Image (cartoon, coloured by chain):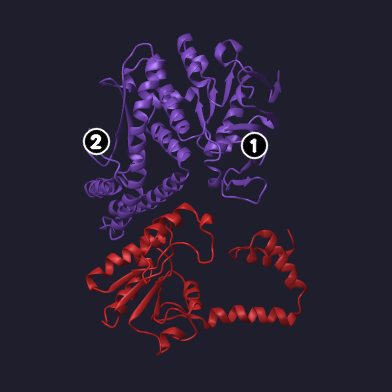
Amino acid sequence: MYVSQLQLADYRSYASAHVVLEPGISTFIGPNGQGKTNLVEAIGYVATLGSHRVATDAPLVRQGAERAIVRAELVKDGRTALVELEINPGKANRARLNRSSATRPRDILGLLRTVLFAPEDLALVKGDPGERRRFLDELLIARAPRYAGVRSDYDRVLKQRNALLKSASARFFKQRAEPDLSTLDVWDDHLATAGAELLAARIGLVAELQPLVAKAYGELASSGGLPVLHYRGSAWPEGTEVPADRDRLAGLLRDALVQARPQELQRGVSLVGPHRDDLYLRLDELPAKGYASQGESWSYALALRLAGFELLRADGDDPVLILDDVFAELDAERRRRLAEHVRTAEQVLVSAAVPGDIPDELVGRRFRVQGGTVERE
Amino acid sequence: MYEGAVQNLIDELGRLPGVGPKSAQRIAFHLLSAETADVKRLVNALVEVKERVRFCAICGNVAEETECRICRDPRRDAAVICVVEESKDVVAIERTREFRGRYHVLGGAISPIEGVGPDDLRIKELMTRLSDGQITELILATDPNLEGEATATYLARLVKPMGLKVTRLASGLPVGGDLEYADEVTLGRAFEGRRSLEF
């Protein structure tokens, strides 16, 4: 698949922009702060309904404007689809497909699939567990959009359960009154069911990623070392291998919730479940976080993204590859190897501050980005 | 902004569910140009609904006497109770003409975010009704969303020791619809709840 047109209105620094794209490699060159990343971020937004840079939608709207509009034309197997998203911070976003009346934004998920490499990716290795959970969930949703529903159901249960825990613990501490726990069992049940579905999918995904990450890392890194992925669940003891079986996982969650209950009541939050888990990354025997060098960490992060790309590709359709300013972070050898790896994708979009950052393998059509305008050279 | 009375009316109408500022304005000007008699009728209807309508002492449904029409009806099956969240759900089920038992209106669903717990719903009243031994089946017809499901699970656990037959409304495909238009969750539920065809 590829993006054939991108139109922006009041998106970040762009009052309006219209870019016509083709399959193959396109590069966006321009000094920093001129809007290169905003362009690829918008494409990423159409794919994931979220930005890779910020957690909320408000910064995506140009200052002084009320809403931002992203319009993307996609071509898949020779057929085109037009996706329009209206980003309304603080209100519900709206989506249209092929100019037909409003669709739920969630229904847009899965139409465009992207794999985005960005300087922020280093956080996959060095950052908090939340970064790695997001990596897994986004990949799950790109492969099967129904997981967006699974994820939001889980979040809803979690919110309800946390609200209950919070009020129960407040009552206990302020009034020394015995909290009413009769409904907590019910929420435990729902958390276990919804959580087990998400867990099973994540664990299955990690198993599929493992060989792909090892292979990609071997090709990118010069130093050797074997990356090992391990899903670290909050509901079972460290180091246990748990099969991706929903009933079994629901049972584990239930037991863990019983054990954690006194602590949960004291702190007023849910301490067990997929929202507390981590994807533990090792390099040989050592944890990547804290032990891997800067270069190794970069290779690891890129290997995770590449593995995601291979997985989506194996499903039958090339995702759009976006390389946002990553080459500046890499040494010449890693640049060349990464370029070698991605150049075969149906569409590759690359952004860089100076043309020299882009390896020769990836020189394609060139766009100049300056002061909120995009021009083909 | 309009002057005094008109603006007051617009503000009051705007407080109603489903009425935005534009609709409130339209309704207000419609009322202004309407016949006095028509407006009086509306006013009477509003006053009357607050004065006359009460909640049924047995089931919690809206009623004009101490007990609602359904609870007073001797032809209704007293052994089956259908639990719903709101009075409007009673009306929806009555339209089917399939159900001949009686109702129990909870007045909402369990939702800690909104501060609604079991004590805020008419659950004690339900337990009292169930304890007289006449009732053999309890149908849980709360909404098929998270809060409704949680309320149903809670009730099912609560009445389990009483040994009643407890059932939950099925969820699945809409009748007369197309399979391809069903969302994944509904379709998944329909698969879970599939039944064998027997001849």
| Amino acid type, mark 2 | Glu
Residue hosting label 1 = A73
Q: Residue furthest front?
A: B199
Within 10 Å of the Cα at label 2, are there few (<14), some (14-19), or many (20+) other Cα atoms? few
- The part of the image, by quadrant, that contains residue A171 is bottom left
Where is residue A237 drawn, in percent x and y?
A: 22, 37
> Is label 1 in a helix, a strand or a loop?
strand
> Which of A283 and A23 lies nearest the eye of the viewer?
A23
> Which of B71 and A145 lies nearest the eye of the viewer?
A145
Number of numbered discs on residues: 2
Does the rendering let one see residue A202? yes
Chain A drawn in what color?
purple
The reply, left or right, for residue A164 in relation to residue A239 is: right
Residue A168, compared with residue B19, is above or below; it is above
Residue A291, compared with residue A311, is above or below; it is above
Residue B92, compared with residue A303, is above or below; it is below
**Circle 1 marks a residue in which chain?**
A
**Circle 2 marks a residue in which chain?**
A
Label 1 vs 2, first from the N-terminus: 1
The reply, left or right, for residue A10 in relation to residue B147 is: right
- The part of the image, by quadrant, that contains residue A123 is top left
Chain B drawn in what color?
red
Residue hosting label 2 = A241
Where is residue B123 drawn, in percent x and y?
A: 34, 71
Give the CA distance from mark 1 to mark 2: 44 Å
Where is residue B106 drawn, in percent x and y?
A: 40, 71
Question: What residue is drawn where x is 63% and y is 82%?
Answer: B44
| Amino acid type, mark 1 | Glu
Please identify the quadrant where the N terminus of chain A is shown: top right
Q: Residue furthest right?
A: B33
